[in-house]
Image (spheres, coloured by chain):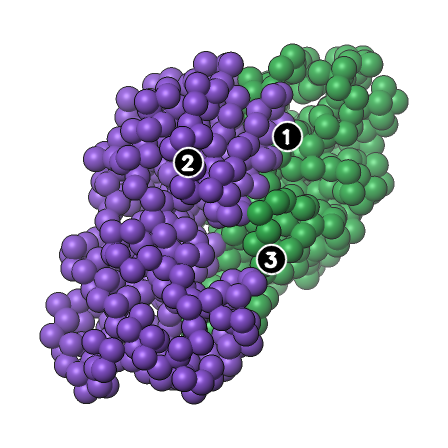
Chain colours: A purple, B green
Amino acid sequence: MANITLAEARRWDKQDSLRDFRAAFRLPPGVIYLDGNSLGPLPRATPSGLDAVVRQEWGNGLIRSWQDAGWIDAPRRVGGKIARLIGAAEDEVVVADSTSVNLFKLLAAALRLRPKARRKILIEAGGFPTDRHVADGLAALLPDLEVVAVEASALAESLDAATSVLLLCDVHYRSGARHDMAALTRAAHAVGALAIWDLSHSAGAVPVDLHAAGADMAVGCGYKYLNGGPGAPAFLFVARHLQAHARSPLQGWIGHAAPFGFSEFYAPADGVVRFLAGTPGVLGLAALECGVDLMLVADAAAVWEKSARLFDLFALRVAARCRALRLLTPAHARQRGSHIAFQHEAAEATMAALIAAGVIGDFRPPDLLRFGLTPLYTRYQDIWRAVEVMAGIVGQ
Amino acid sequence: MANITLAEARRWDKQDSLRDFRAAFRLPPGVIYLDGNSLGPLPRATPSGLDAVVRQEWGNGLIRSWQDAGWIDAPRRVGGKIARLIGAAEDEVVVADSTSVNLFKLLAAALRLRPKARRKILIEAGGFPTDRHVADGLAALLPDLEVVAVEASALAESLDAATSVLLLCDVHYRSGARHDMAALTRAAHAVGALAIWDLSHSAGAVPVDLHAAGADMAVGCGYKYLNGGPGAPAFLFVARHLQAHARSPLQGWIGHAAPFGFSEFYAPADGVVRFLAGTPGVLGLAALECGVDLMLVADAAAVWEKSARLFDLFALRVAARCRALRLLTPAHARQRGSHIAFQHEAAEATMAALIAAGVIGDFRPPDLLRFGLTPLYTRYQDIWRAVEVMAGIVGQ
């Protein structure tokens, strides 16, 4: 694969069972977009879908659309669709707020489900910073709560009788390394802790099966692999058997058992809907639903298979053409997500030059080049060309 | 005014200095919309404004638009515009999350700014339920925190040395009664408490001057009088002198001093921006900005003056034509917001019949008919006609 020619890469594209999905996105000419793991591109169906919500449902329907156009059910409806992508049941997922806010809700809820003496949240050192910020923020609020960060290799052994919650990102935002969700969840349960998974860098890209893993709770992002648009609302998952006793600290009217009853006192709705708080952002939900609908049409196994092949092509072409780059992402597909990361001492300048040349990836400080592998719209020939452009910048 | 004819009402409309604003909204034919206090109608500029963000900024700009299109600054930029509507400085307001989530942040932050021994949040009994739900949710999380609800008339005397925060809605969501923000804030300060104001039912409609009132913190809603669209993001205000020590419990990457530094540890940004948490919802912000821009063009004094006159016309015509209705809203303009509420034993059926006849207001259980008075697009003749339709339903 290292010596593959552009013509061969193009032949792979012709044989690709997902090739027709590319036309479902509006990609600007002259750009090779390898940043769909930060912000997915615009699905062609989204502008008209959103415009219909704006002009017809808002403009003509006005307040009536909360019922008539199903706005009130949108968090459940779109959540139910996302559930199918992550191995959850439809009544276990809702769309709401941001990933950070949802994580705060779930962490606080999980702590309450465990004995009060357990005051440790275990996280991965060097994991997604905003998840740690959320945990630290909760710890600053509550007495005696401790956030303990350890290296990935020490996670299992660091679970103990004081651990309340194990909070992890499924896929590491830098390296792309993937945890064994089932094994770590089992290890958490073995000491009586709950496991919360942040699926931001996996949902819509990587095979995720929350039920098979026995996961307790999860959050995830709408604007990366789900192509929901900039700042799309996030989602959250609470396993059905935990829902009746799980309480969100963010109590708002939409999570009330009778949201239009205007009772002075809060009574949580049945099920995962109790984790809603304020009024759902209808426009963001509408755009997200367009992205999710597109993802649901694709064969998830084919998506993951192509991701792995895009990765191999990228890694081998870089090894052949850009020897100054060091691959950070695990080589085995089972151990990684759907992006590829390289270390390079001049990573920031290199990424700036790449973007100027129309190859869009991410720089992550201090020395990381990160590229999203998004099979619905990324072709083998794009990877081939991107590596050639990079070789012209960093030298062979 | 009670005996005004339709022709006279129309003459008032012709003389109305705000009459041209009606054309800036897309109002469906055959509808008299008196529910802009629940969901503002669609400004004509919004669909194309939003479409440009979607097609050009997202579609063509992709991830680059966080910088190139100013997405990253949108919470501050739109917040700064809203500041001008509520008597705040531009660097005291940001747009973020929902009103409920923002209130949670501010309540927790305010509690930390007061001595720990103060464990009382004082609210109005029968006030906006979701605000109480938020306070109760925080109280369930934190030790010894107490939410005390008293009648409006007993608020000032219930402030004491144990009070940490006085939390009130500026305008009551049912009656439309308005508090004296300056006097109650002074009373809170006199006992060493902070005052947080929920402006959801006043921002964009009623004269609000947070600086003149000495308010400490405030939240408010984007989708009511600001015409920001269904579930538009909300805003929050923190007085400048409190910002350096105020800490949000919801710590996310966008509130970090260096959001693109990806530091493992949280350091709050300078200023009110530290109250941001997760990734801003760009589409919701874009629609909200269209609504706010329109409001900024209008003369606020003229808006309030017309609101008062719409109210008087409504109240007097109802007194003349619908005697079964009892006015609940204070008659004096200084004591009320920009909606009008009537009690009627068959309120629910009456509102259903009104809506079926094209007059859209709100029913609030158990017995309330509520109508928003929104001077930018509501005409005197609309009020006149609405009362006639109501007279046909409830009898004279």
Whether residue A270 is situated above or below residue A381 in the rendered picture: above
Q: CA distance from mark 2 to mark 3?
A: 25 Å
Please, what secondary structure does the residue beneath circle 3 have? loop
Q: In this image, A104 relative to B30: left or right?
A: right
Amino acid tagged 2: Leu
- Which chain is home to disc 1? A
Say which residue label 2 marks: A155
Q: Quadrant of the N terminus of chain B?
A: top right
Whether residue B37 is situated above or below residue B66 in the rendered picture: above
- Image position, residue A16 (x, y; %): 14, 71
Labels 2 and 1 share a subunit: yes
Please, what secondary structure does the residue beneath circle 1 have? helix
Seen as rendered, the residue at the extreme right is B190
Identify the residue at image location x=81%, y=29%. Answer: B185
Numbered mark located on residue A140 in the image: 1
In the image shown, does B60 or A325 lie closer to the viewer? A325
Amino acid tagged 3: Gly
Q: CA distance from mark 1 to mark 3?
A: 22 Å
Residue A83's quadrant in the figure? top left
Say which residue label 3 marks: B261
Report whether residue A28 is seen: no
Residue A192's quadrant in the figure? top left
- Image position, residue A241 (x, y; %): 28, 22
Task: Classify mark 1: residues with Cα within 10 Å, few (<14), some (14-19) or many (20+).
Answer: some
In the image shown, does B80 or B311 lie closer to the viewer? B80
- Which chain is home to disc 2? A
Labels 2 and 3 share a subunit: no
- Image position, residue B47 (x, y; %): 45, 64
Whether residue A246 is situated above or below residue A306 in the rendered picture: above
Q: In this image, A275 relative to B171: left or right?
A: left
Identify the residue at image location x=23%, y=41%. Answer: A209
Residue B329's quadrant in the figure? top right
